[in-house]
Image (cartoon, grey):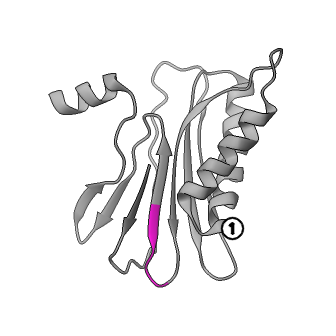
């Protein structure tokens, strides 16, 4: 999914928060990439599992996603390109780790786009108000979100 925000945004900062809970390893990863023209992409992957292989994969995948999205100045195109890359790498005898992902891209001059897959959430803090930019893709997530 993709959403474009029409307002002129000067993205000056970003933040992430994480809680490992009872996981042995933190397998979530974030990455930021800024191109020479000032286009900036922020990527977050919520890795499934808690092994060294998953942690390593999500860190590398977050960097790749941020580079792809910033390079194309488009969140959805970056996410789709990386999905195709990893889908092509899967074989019957070799399964890759997986993750929910969200990526946001800010292009100087105002365009701000987001794209996501799975239950990963992103918010925009603008003028003191939080705005949810994503929606859960699984039915269980939608039920939980509406029940609270």
Range drawn in magenta? 109-113
Seen from the viewer's position, the closer of residues 129 and 132 is 132
Q: Main secondary structure of the magenta part?
A: loop
Seen from the viewer's position, the closer of residues 24 and 137 is 137
Seen from the viewer's position, the closer of residues 104 and 14 is 104
Q: Could you tell me which residue is drawn at 66 percent across and 37 percent down?
A: 58
Q: Position of residue 67 (x, y in %)?
A: 69, 60
Q: Could you tell me which residue is drawn at 47 percent across and 85 percent down?
A: 109
Measured along the vertical axis of the image, is residue 144 above or below residue 34? above
Tell me the residue that label 1 is attached to: 71
* Direction from residue 143 to residue 56 in the image, left or right: right
Corner quadrant of residue 124: bottom left
Seen from the viewer's position, the closer of residues 23 and 30 is 30
Please tell me how crowded label 1 is: few (under 14), some (14-19), or many (20+) other residues with Cα within 10 Å.
Answer: many
| SS of the residue under disc 1 | helix
Is residue 110 inside the magenta stretch?
yes
Q: Position of residue 1 (x, y in %)?
A: 44, 49
Q: Is residue 53 visible?
A: yes
Q: Could you tell me which residue is drawn at 24 percent across and 32 percent down?
A: 145
Is residue 136 inside the magenta stretch?
no
């Amino acid at each position: 999914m993709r959403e474009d925000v029409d307002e002129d945004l000067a993205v000056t900062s970003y933040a992430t928060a994480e809680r490992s809970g009872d996981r042995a390893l933190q397998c979530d990863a974030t990455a930021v990439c800024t191109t020479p023209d000032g286009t900036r992409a922020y990527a977050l992957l919520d890795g499934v599992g808690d092994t060294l292989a998953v942690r390593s994969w999500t860190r590398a995948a977050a960097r790749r996603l941020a580079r792809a999205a910033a390079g194309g100045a488009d969140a959805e195109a970056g996410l789709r390109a990386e999905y195709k890359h990893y889908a092509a790498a899967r074989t019957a005898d070799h399964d890759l780790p997986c993750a929910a992902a969200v990526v946001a891209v800010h292009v100087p001059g105002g365009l701000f786009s987001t794209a996501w897959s799975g239950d990963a959430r992103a918010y925009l803090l603008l003028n003191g108000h939080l705005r949810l930019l994503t929606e859960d893709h699984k039915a269980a997530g939608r039920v939980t979100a509406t029940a609270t």
